[in-house]
Structure formats: structure tokens, C-alpha cells
């Protein structure tokens, strides 16, 4: 099963998320999690689990512990729910484990504990100083720095807890990212009230993470001040992919999940899910291949930076 198919199995009702995450994983395929390792902002652990080579049974998906569906359009995190009995059925363990999982949401940490992929769990707000001594970790992965209040402070903290010679892999939004947002481009940027309805697509993403988008030069300056050096830099996620993700099936998600939950025959539901995945594989696999061949560019810089950083 390819990484894209594995991700579609988990995120089948949000196939645009599966596409994005597959591109993330392919982009960072050469980064090795070694020694004492930290997954900073691990969430439910599913992305890192799959990135590590783990696989789930087809009977499992990401929607088996969901809440706040009635508040979906008020920008509530529907995944920030832990239901007793939540237990992913794992068909293959990852090729390695993380030493530490850190996240500020207890429900997500509870989910990550069910994976058998982390040795230790820390409930902590990453906006604050991390509860680790200097030079504690050999490798760090984080996909949350741009969600935090002060990127310079956050990367300084990563530098502090990283061992000398240790490496950190970070995903950080490029300055082009806001222009790929329909909500920003049509409503915010031009102050056009006709497009205010696009807030139901955006769901708070512009105000929370898109505004922290920075150019390579700006990120390089922040990284340099932190005492880290750039070992690898790549750009990924074209405008085409981001605009597919920007709409996707997001607006339909609550009603799609209600339809799924209304199917009482679990064997029939599995048949529907399998057919659904096959349809989206036909659509998304060619897009994934074109993206990795750099053929989806629209002459703009891509939306995200991928950095591997090393402690000087």
C-alpha cells in the first residue's frame, strides 16, 4: 500500500488532507529520526506514525473519535476529542519509535498513546519554554512552529534542547501561501464583502497560521539567530495543490460523517469506503506524481518550506 493510499485510508472523508500529507512525507523522506527524539506538536500521532512506515487496518480511520460537529463552522477542532474505546487497529508497526511526544491538547495525546509509537508523553503549551534540559535531543520533528505565537522564540527553544550536531526537521509556510487562499485573495486582501462567505472554507486558518508565512530570507534570518544552520532546504506544495486543499471536501465534512454514521451495516460501509478510496486514488495519485515532478507549478513559489536544521 502506497503512502498516499495509507493516508486515504485514514483521511478518506478529507482526501485533500491525504494528498497534502503524502507530499509532506515524500518531501522529508531523507530525514532520519535517530537517538533521543522529539515529536514537537505530535497531535494524534497519525502523521508521524505513517511517515515512520506504520500502517493501519482498513477498518480504521481518523473519524472514530470526533466531537463538536455542531460547532464545525465556528472553527472548533473536531479532532480534539477522545472517546473511551478508541483503539486503532494496526497492521504494521513503524520502523522506529519517537522517544517523546509533546502536545498542548490532552485529547490528542490520549489518541497518540494508543499507537505504541512513543515512549513518553508531555502535555505542554509549546508557546512556553519546553520542560527539557539544554542539549536533550538528537532529532526533532515539528509541523507546528507556524501555529505558535513567536516563531523566533519557538526555533530558539528547538535549538536549546537540540544536541550539538543534532538535527530538526521543520515545515514552515512561505510568503506565497496567503495568496493561495481564496478567503484572503478575494475577501481579506481586497476588502470585498461579497466574498465574506468564504470564511466557511477558511475556518480561521488565515488568522491563525497563514499570517505567519515568511520568505526563505526571513526564515533563514530567524534560523541563523537561533544558533542553527540549514542543512537541507526544499520547497513543496504548489498553488494547484493548495487550492485543491483550500476547498476539498471540507464544507461537506459534517454531513458526510453523519451519512457514514447512519450506515449500520459495517460490511457495507467498508465496501463503500474501499470504492471511495479507489476513486480518489485515480484522481490524486496522478496529481501527487505531477507535484513531485514539479509539473503543477503556476509560476509562483511553492507554499511551504521544508528545512533540516543542525545545531552548530
Image: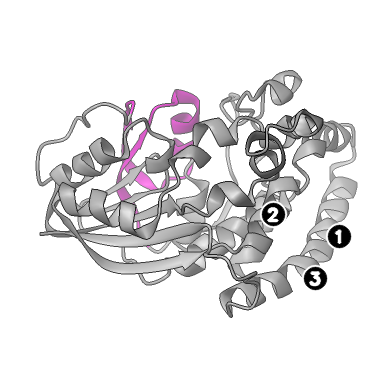
Q: Residue at x 80, y 70 (%)?
A: 282
- Magenta part of the protein: which range? 96-125
Left or right side of 228 for 147: right
Q: Nearer the viewer, mark 3 or mark 1?
A: 3
Q: Earlier in the sequence, mark 3 or mark 2?
A: 2
Q: Nearer the viewer, mark 1 or mark 2?
A: 2
Other-residue count near label 3 (Cα within 10 Å), few / some / many at <14 / 14–19 / ≥20: few
Residue holding disc 1 = 275
How far across and down, in percent of the image, does residue 21 sit?
56, 56
Pointer 3 with pointer 2, Cβ within 8 A: no
Front residue of 245/63: it is 245
Residue holding disc 2 = 243
Image-quadrant location for residue 257: top right
Left or right side of 102 for 205: right
How far across and down, in percent of the image, does residue 275 sit?
86, 60
Residue holding disc 3 = 282
Residue 213 position (above or below residue 55)? above
Gap in Å between the C-alphas at discs 3 and 1? 11 Å
Q: Which SS class for mark 3? A: helix
Q: Nearer the viewer, mark 3 or mark 2?
A: 2
Q: Residue at x 32, y 53 (%)?
A: 219
Left or right side of 258 for 235: left
Amino acid at each position: 500500500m502506497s503512502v498516499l493510499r495509507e493516508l486515504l485510508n485514514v483521511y478518506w472523508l478529507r482526501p485533500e488532507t491525504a494528498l497534502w500529507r503524502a507530499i509532506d512525507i515524500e518531501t522529508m523522506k531523507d530525514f532520519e529520526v535517530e537517538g533521543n527524539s522529539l515529536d514537537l506538536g505530535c497531535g494524534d500521532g497519525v502523521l508521524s506514525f505513517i511517515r515512520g512506515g506504520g500502517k493501519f487496518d482498513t477498518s480504521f480511520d481518523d473519524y472514530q473519535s470526533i466531537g463538536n460537529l455542531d460547532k464545525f463552522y465556528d472553527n472548533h477542532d473536531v479532532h480534539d476529542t477522545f472517546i473511551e474505546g478508541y483503539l486503532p487497529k494496526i497492521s504494521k508497526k513503524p520502523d522506529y519509535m519517537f522517544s517523546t511526544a509533546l502536545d498542548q491538547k490532552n485529547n490528542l495525546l490520549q489518541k497518540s498513546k494508543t499507537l505504541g509509537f512513543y515512549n513518553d508523553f508531555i502535555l505542554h503549551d509549546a508557546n512556553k519554554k519546553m520542560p527539557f534540559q539544554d542539549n536533550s535531543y538528537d532529532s526533532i520533528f515539528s509541523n507546528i512552529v507556524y501555529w505558535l505565537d513567536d516563531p523566533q522564540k519557538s526555533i530558539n527553544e528547538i535549538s536549546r534542547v537540540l544536541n550539538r550536531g543534532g538535527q530538526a526537521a521543520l515545515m514552515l509556510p512561505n510568503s506565497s501561501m496567503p495568496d493561495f487562499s481564496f478567503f484572503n485573495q478575494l475577501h481579506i486582501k481586497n476588502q470585498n464583502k461579497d466574498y465574506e462567505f468564504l470564511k466557511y472554507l477558511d475556518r480561521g486558518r488565515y488568522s491563525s497560521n497563514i499570517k505567519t508565512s515568511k520568505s526563505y530570507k526571513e526564515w533563514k534570518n530567524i534560523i541563523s539567530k537561533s544558533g542553527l544552520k540549514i542543512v537541507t532546504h526544499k520547497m513543496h506544495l504548489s498553488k494547484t495543490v493548495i487550492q485543491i486543499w483550500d476547498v476539498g471536501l471540507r464544507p461537506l465534512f459534517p454531513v458526510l460523517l453523519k451519512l457514514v454514521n447512519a450506515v449500520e451495516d459495517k460490511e457495507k460501509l467498508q465496501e463503500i469506503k474501499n470504492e471511495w478510496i479507489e476513486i480518489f486514488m485515480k484522481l490524486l495519485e496522478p496529481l501527487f506524481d505531477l507535484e513531485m515532478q514539479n509539473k503543477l507549478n503556476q509560476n509562483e513559489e511553492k507554499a511551504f518550506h521544508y528545512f533540516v536544521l543542525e545545531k552548530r
